[in-house]
Image: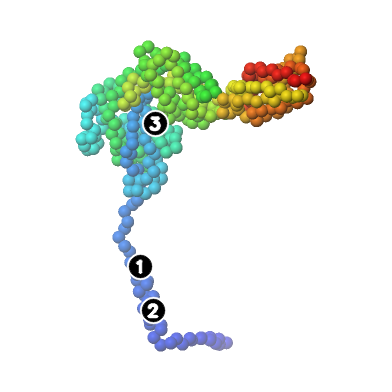
Amino acid sequence: MSHRISVTTRHLRPGRPLVGALMLCALLAGCGKKGDPLPPQRFNPAITQDLTLSQQGDLLVVRLGYPQTTASGTVLPGLQGLELWRMESSPDVDLATMPESLFASRADRLLTLSEGELRSSVTGNRIVARFPITPEMSDAEAQVFAIRTVSTTGEPSDYSNRVAMVLGPAPLPPNQLEVTARDVGIELSWTAAEGETEFSVYRRGARDRTYAAPIGRVTAGDPLTYLDQDVDFGQSYFYTVRSIANQEPLVESAAAVEVEIDYQDRFAPPPPTGLNALPEPGRVRLVWEPSPADDATGYIIYRQDPRAEFRRITDNPTSALEYLDTGLSPGQSYAYRLSAIDGNGNEGEPSSEVQATIPE
């Protein structure tokens, strides 16, 4: 048996297939051409330029901004470590003229923060790391420090700006720190260790892991107190105080005992002033000046009837500065006093009494 195969042939216009084929060959030839290989992308962090150091007790405190970019300006994927480098020097070292090559040739890597330790040292866009002061650091006459940050790819930055520091014995911490809630803020008081005359005050919120910069400094006085007015009712705060041995660079003691306070508004407003009782037939018109407290929201009115005790005559506080008391008996005398109340229901002490006799 034979099979017939049918073949259909399309006739193209003359010249078209040749042009199309040539163009296709040219495109394919261009796609196959390889350029020069690109260098591998580097993730060395940008150089830290804002390194500062201070001493707190037996700790060296390192502060710097968290690097956001690589040395080439691209986005930094993150950090896996921070290295502290140290070089011994003379007390009169001039950092402005010190060649970077000199520091690089003489400095030793002293301590390293791993990724987990570094993560716990980050607050917002800042790194605050604390390194123990080793014997070789405390025995040196003077020394120069720098840091290097290491990206998550393991690539280090260049050395940061360098900081010279003389580490010595820390001053003694303050004693008997107490905190007291006031209507205008939180008051701290403490006693000084012998010979200590200047102090740093620190505050952190209940959700903050560490203390930031001091909120205030106090020079020795009697008593030693500090009023923190930058606080809000309904918040909890932690406080500590450190003695200061040197301001620049900052050398402080270890922290005094940390004290927590739950700062709630339990402070009643003072009474209104200038209360006057103006008698009229069958009634008394009361007028007064407002309470000096900014948070006073209303006033409660008390009246003393003849041969009776004072009793409250307003179901709800009035926000007005006057009140009309009606239904009073002619010829009878009545005494009045007022108290102020705030939005949290804290009622203050009563005002001075005033009296009025209803005309016959």
Query: Does 42 sit left or right of 287 as displayed?
Result: left
**Residue located 54% across and 27% down the image:** 236
* Residue 105 in view, yes or no: no
Label 1, secondary structure: give it: loop
Residue 104 in which image quadrant: top left
Q: Which SS class for mark 2?
A: helix
**How far apart are labels 1 and 2 at the CA level?**
17 Å
Residue type at mark 1?
Gly
- Residue 18, quarter of picture: bottom left
Disc 3 target residue = 129
Task: Give the amino acid type for the residue marked by disc 2 in the picture.
Answer: Ala
How far apart, in angstroms, are the residues tagged by discs 2 and 3? 68 Å
Disc marking residue 32: 1
Q: Which residue is mark 2?
A: 21
For this rendering, which residue is in front, 56 or 345? 345
Q: Position of residue 223 (x, y in %)?
A: 44, 14
Mark 1 vs 2, N-terminal side = 2
